Amino acid sequence: MKSFLNQKRIFEPEGMCLLEEIRAYDGLVEKSLKILHYGFLETIINFSPETGLFLDVGAGTGHLAVGLAKLCPNVFVVAIDLSENMLLVAREKAEREGVLARIAFVKADAKRLPFPDETFDCVYCHNMLHHLPEPYLLLSEIKRVVKADGAVLVRDLIRVSPFERVIHVNVFGLPYTKLMKKEYSDSIKAALSREEWHELARKINIPGARVTYQFLTHQSLERPSARRRTSYFRVPVPTFLRPITRFYISRPGDMPLLTTRKDLSRRLKTLLKAAILAPSGDNLQPWRFRVKNEEEIDLFFDPQVDTSFFNFRQYATYIALGACVANLKYLLGQENIEHEFIFSEAREDGLTKVGTLKIKWPGQHFAFKTSLEESALFKRVTNRKPYNKINLGSEGLRPLLSPFKGGPVEVKLLTGEALQELAELIYLADIIRVERKDLHEFLHATIRWSKEEIDHRKDGMPLETLEAGRAGEAILRLTRPWPVMKALSRLGLSRAMAAHTRMLTLSSEGVLAFCPEDFGPRGFFETGKTMERLWLLLAQKGLAAQPLAAAPLFLLRWRAGRFFDFSPRHQAILHHLERGFERLGLDRCVMLLRFGRAAPPKTRTPRKELASFLLK
């Protein structure tokens, strides 16, 4: 059933090329697709500057380019397409509408754009990606030729299940001719699924761009220009079409403007670099900062950065933001700088604000003496190697745990028999993790497989950080396709991988369990702060640590009543898992951290440039 619902892309047959075919197609588009064009045109205009050079990628017969030139007299459009006949029809249209002088029609390959870097104030592309076997190449070119503060708008169909496709074609395509319905169906088959679109957006990593959806049919990757027009422009649309057109309009006010802040003082740069050394789910780095002035920094996160099954209600992201604040407080505390973080949750422009850091600098020209590279902040790293027990005992561990007594998060230590029982529960949770298609695909999407990908993305997990060894890395590469992983799991691979996690747990000196009083966003935020503070203490003592997130994060979803998010087999495992956590007194546990002595990891996870996290 799942394979039926999640069919792979089926590329469209060769399109029309004869001039008479294209003229006929243009007439049908003019008659039947006005709503899509009106909506996207209004989006382009309001995301972009009032003046400048715009690029229309895959212009076809020129509906958007001509409409844009007519409505925006201070814009010059370069319209490219591979079909000379398409461009001929587009050129005729521009001449009829009196805008030919402000549109340059160019035959060009969208995968190899003949323009210098950072040329255009806006680049847009409509319903073209489904024609390309490798859409990443097109997006790479768009990213290259758009200015750093320019608008990016890429919109295409969503590939849906065969059943949904029939509904889309026969309901949304009701006014279409028989030929147009067939082409519409073929285009849906060739489009990207929502998951593939998200992964493409994550892979291309255009600063400030985010995925949006238009009605049930289209998905977009959009970034407003930092120089966009200040007053909203309404495209003249027939009154009877305006209500439907709204479904295809994105509003730039719903999105943040990311800019490169070049005016940060040296001390603020140091402070924020400390913050982004914090751990986050699969190293996706969801934090964003708005520097209001030298003494106040607002902290946000982007909820679209981590949409994995693990990140239920963004709880894992709140933990990451808490760790981020712990790093800020650590560095300020090292130099006895008075400060306060005020937790205050709010939604702003599609982001979630979690609070404000207020700082009282000791002097106008204060500079940090602490070196980040020599501090615990840099030494703290996820280490997935087997550990050696060091037999600290309760006396040796008491100084580590005593600062957290009476805090908002109870920290429990599991060693001995409790550790052995916990290892069995972690084994069961890992079976679920390995056997879920969504988590398998998300994991492989966040692994960075080559040095080039690591250097380009600066997020996710370099393959070496998994400490899988040559054999393990070969298995990871082999099982990237889900059908391979599914088949091998039936032969016992899922149990073998889960057994490896159990072995790692049992090799540890102990496991720390974090149990907040509050089960809302504030509680998870405080959990992140507490975990990171303890992790930094462990790093100072030369100890290794690794979060064990699967079991507690599965149970969060389970205890929220989301039973049917799991298969019947996994439901049975979760019943056992829940009882086991209760026996260990971990009914409020939301995160686990194993620790012990270990050799340093082969490599550490990278971090993006600070500028990519700064809000205007």
Image (tube, rainbow, N blue to C red):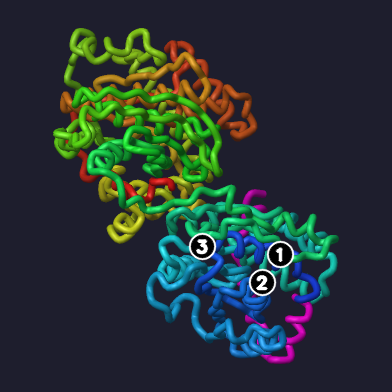
Quarter holding residue 449: bottom left
State the separation of the CA atoms marked 2 and 3. Answer: 17 Å
Image position of 212 (left or right of 286): right
Looking at the image, the residue that sits furthest to the front is: 364
Please state which of residues 58 and 451 is positioned toward the viewer in this rendering: 58
Question: Which type of secondary structure does the marked residue at label 2 adopt?
Answer: helix
For residue 197, above or below residue 36: above
**Of the image marks 2 and 3, the number of the one nearer the N terminus:** 2
Image position of 40 (left or right of 283): right
Question: Which type of secondary structure does the marked residue at label 1 adopt?
Answer: loop
Q: CB under 8 Å between callouts 2 and 1? A: yes
Q: Position of residue 265 (x, y in %)?
A: 26, 43
Residue at mark 1? 235
Residue at mark 2? 71
Amino acid on which disc 2 is placed: Leu
Q: Position of residue 365 (x, y in %)?
A: 19, 37
For residue 12, above or below residue 217: below
Number of the front mark, 1 or 3: 1
Q: Position of residue 271 (x, y in %)?
A: 27, 37
